[in-house]
Image (cartoon, helix red, strand yellow):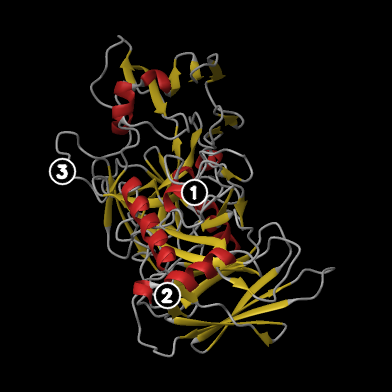
């Protein structure tokens, strides 16, 4: 469970996430990067959507972001600079790649007096118009980066703590707003020190008729964040703490859950199942005022099963998809040797440390990092820095500039070392056999199920004569049909298509494991957490259990 939680936090860009995930962010994160809060001050009209969206119009000439004092940092800029890293299917290569999508669900807190005045005078018309216009601006400005199948939705709330000239936006991975017609599939029954708590309903104002929805867990909801009174998307009345703790649920199956709390505090989170209901508990650390928070999750009274989705077609990187609970994570690349007749190889890296695409190498080679091996040994060329020479073999870890990529030693005879990637490319094995290999440039439409093409880079090889051989590093150790991959009894099986297709089983620390003498032609059996070396590609196998 701890390993699963750590990987989930990493996937959200929270604790331990590579810095380049967050390089554009400027809002302070809350709850381990599960939530962002944008506070605007100097607001003349809290229901003027144009002024809240950006500084191009409306009544917002005095609006500033509270922590920086900058006028340009409004909701549009905040959504632009704080994205959700998601796992996207690359149909051309049978793999998962990382991309980012704009958050769609936003909660807007407005001053209580503004809310009450509009309810009295217009029946909530201006509140509804403000929400609809924010949705329109959101759709127009981010139409190319919205997650598939999920449109923006806004919830406006009155907040008695806000002065008349301030508003507060909440958005992030843990903010989920159901459609007005939806009903929960699980009811929430919280209690504090065994005393029941009453949660506020979600209030909608469609066509002047207020509609309330109970807080709960909805069919297409992925996670749930509960926070102390006065903070977060679902605050618990009466729960008060001196720290930024929380209770967070992640749905992992039809009725399966993971629970955790603040990574920097000592609150103890636990879960237990009683029949078809779950009880999640959070206990205060020793030395603090004793508090026992419990949340009972009960199938809703309608109890009609509704299939759950993936929060608008997006998937969190680093976690299994709803289709398969298994992943192969491309974590590192084995530095190749110079085969007979080759003088030099080059691996091109993006400024953040990931393998560069052929298009980038062709158009912007001077912007890229070059990792090379020639007769003088390994060298590292980073734009704007002196050339770094590292010898023939990596003997100790080497940082690659400001990236999260590294060069690591590797315990294999004749090896030059490993290139550890800053974030993995993901593949999803399953019970059926799937083909792992590389794409044939002459027949790109006939790709293997898992196409490992990261080393199919131009300008990467040179003969001793200085000429380009006409093929890439990918050709040196990986075949078009290299291995069959499938899962059996929670273990990964890998079978070489031909004796000339190298495969190796590594433990979770990248140490090669000996091949059993009686193995013969049987496939490699790799338990969760261990690694497969296919050609120059090092992939870690993960399942729900590890």
In front: label 2 or label 1: 2
349 or 449: which is nearer to us?
Answer: 349
**Vertical placement of 263 versus 366: above or below?**
below
Instruction: Check whether the beta carbons of the residues at disc 2 and disc 3 lie within 8 A of each other.
Output: no
**Vertical placement of 45 versus 213: above or below?**
above
x and y, in percent, of residue 161 in the image: 65, 63
Q: Which residue is mark 2?
A: 218
What residue is shown at x 54% (from left), y 16% (from top)?
A: 385
x and y, in percent, of residue 35 in the image: 55, 57
Marks 2 and 3, how far apart at CA:
40 Å
Identify the image quadrant of residue 167: bottom right
N-terminal of the pair, mark 2 or mark 1, is 2
x and y, in percent, of residue 377 in the image: 49, 18
As helix, strand or loop, the secondary structure at mark 3 comes to loop
Query: Dot 3: within a 10 Å radius of its alpha carbon, few (fewer than 14), some, or many (20 or more) residues?
Result: few
**Vertical placement of 107 versus 209: above or below?**
above
x and y, in percent, of residue 412 in the image: 51, 36
Q: Which quarter of the rendering shows the N terminus?
A: bottom right
Q: From this viewpoint, which residue is outermost toward the front?
A: 121
Marks 3 and 1, how far apart at CA:
37 Å
186 or 448: which is nearer to us?
Answer: 186
**Vertical placement of 532 versus 233: above or below?**
above
Q: Which residue is mark 1?
A: 514
443 or 268: which is nearer to us?
Answer: 268
């Amino acid at each position: 469970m701890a390993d699963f939680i750590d990987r989930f936090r990493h996937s959200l860009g929270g604790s331990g996430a590579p810095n380049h995930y967050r390089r554009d962010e400027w809002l302070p994160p809350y709850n381990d990067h599960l939530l962002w809060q944008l506070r605007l001050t100097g607001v003349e009209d809290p229901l003027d959507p144009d002024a809240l969206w950006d500084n191009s119009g409306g009544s917002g000439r005095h609006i500033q972001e509270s922590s920086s004092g900058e006028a340009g940092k409004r909701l549009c800029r905040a959504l632009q600079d704080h994205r959700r890293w998601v796992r996207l299917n690359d149909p051309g290569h049978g793999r998962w790649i990382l991309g980012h999508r704009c958050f769609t669900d936003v909660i807007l807190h407005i001053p209580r007096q503004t809310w009450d005045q509009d309810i009295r005078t217009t029946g909530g018309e201006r509140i509804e118009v403000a929400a609809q216009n924010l949705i329109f601006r959101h759709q127009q400005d981010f139409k190319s980066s919205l997650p598939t199948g999920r449109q923006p939705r806004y919830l406006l709330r009155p907040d008695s703590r806000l002065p008349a000239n301030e508003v507060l936006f909440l958005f992030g991975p843990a903010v989920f707003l159901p459609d007005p017609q939806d009903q929960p599939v699980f009811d929430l029954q919280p209690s504090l020190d065994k005393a029941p708590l009453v949660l506020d309903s979600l209030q909608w104002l469609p066509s002047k008729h207020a509609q309330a929805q109970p807080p709960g867990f909805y069919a297409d909801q992925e996670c749930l964040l509960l926070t102390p009174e006065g903070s977060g998307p679902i605050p618990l009345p009466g729960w008060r703490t001196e720290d930024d703790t929380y209770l967070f649920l992640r749905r992992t199956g039809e009725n399966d859950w993971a629970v955790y709390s603040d990574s920097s505090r000592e609150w103890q989170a636990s879960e237990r199942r009683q029949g078809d209901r779950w009880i999640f508990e959070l206990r205060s650390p020793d030395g603090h005022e004793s508090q026992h928070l419990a949340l009972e999750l009960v199938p809703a009274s309608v109890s009609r099963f509704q299939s759950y989705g993936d929060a608008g077609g997006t998937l969190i990187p680093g976690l299994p998809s709803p289709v398969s609970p298994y992943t192969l994570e491309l974590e590192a690349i084995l530095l190749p040797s110079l085969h007979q007749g080759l003088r030099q190889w080059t691996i091109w890296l993006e400024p953040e440390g990931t393998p560069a695409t052929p298009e980038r190498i062709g158009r912007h080679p001077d912007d890229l990092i070059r990792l090379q091996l020639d007769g003088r040994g390994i060298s590292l060329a980073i734009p704007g820095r002196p050339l770094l020479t590292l010898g023939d073999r990596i003997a100790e870890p080497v940082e690659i500039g400001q990236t999260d990529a590294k060069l690591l030693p590797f315990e294999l005879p004749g090896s030059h070392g490993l290139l550890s990637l800053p974030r993995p490319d993901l593949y999803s094995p399953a019970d059926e056999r799937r083909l792992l290999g590389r794409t044939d440039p002459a027949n790109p439409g006939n790709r293997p199920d898992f196409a490992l093409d990261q080393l199919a880079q131009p300008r990467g090889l040179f003969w001793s004569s200085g000429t380009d051989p006409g093929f890439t590093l990918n050709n040196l150790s990986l075949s078009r049909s290299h291995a069959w991959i499938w899962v059996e009894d929670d273990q990964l099986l890998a079978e070489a298509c031909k004796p000339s297709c190298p495969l190796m089983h590594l433990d979770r620390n990248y140490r090669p494991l000996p091949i059993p003498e009686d193995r013969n032609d049987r496939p490699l059996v790799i338990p969760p957490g261990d690694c497969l070396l296919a050609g120059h590609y090092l992939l870690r196998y993960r399942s729900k259990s590890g």
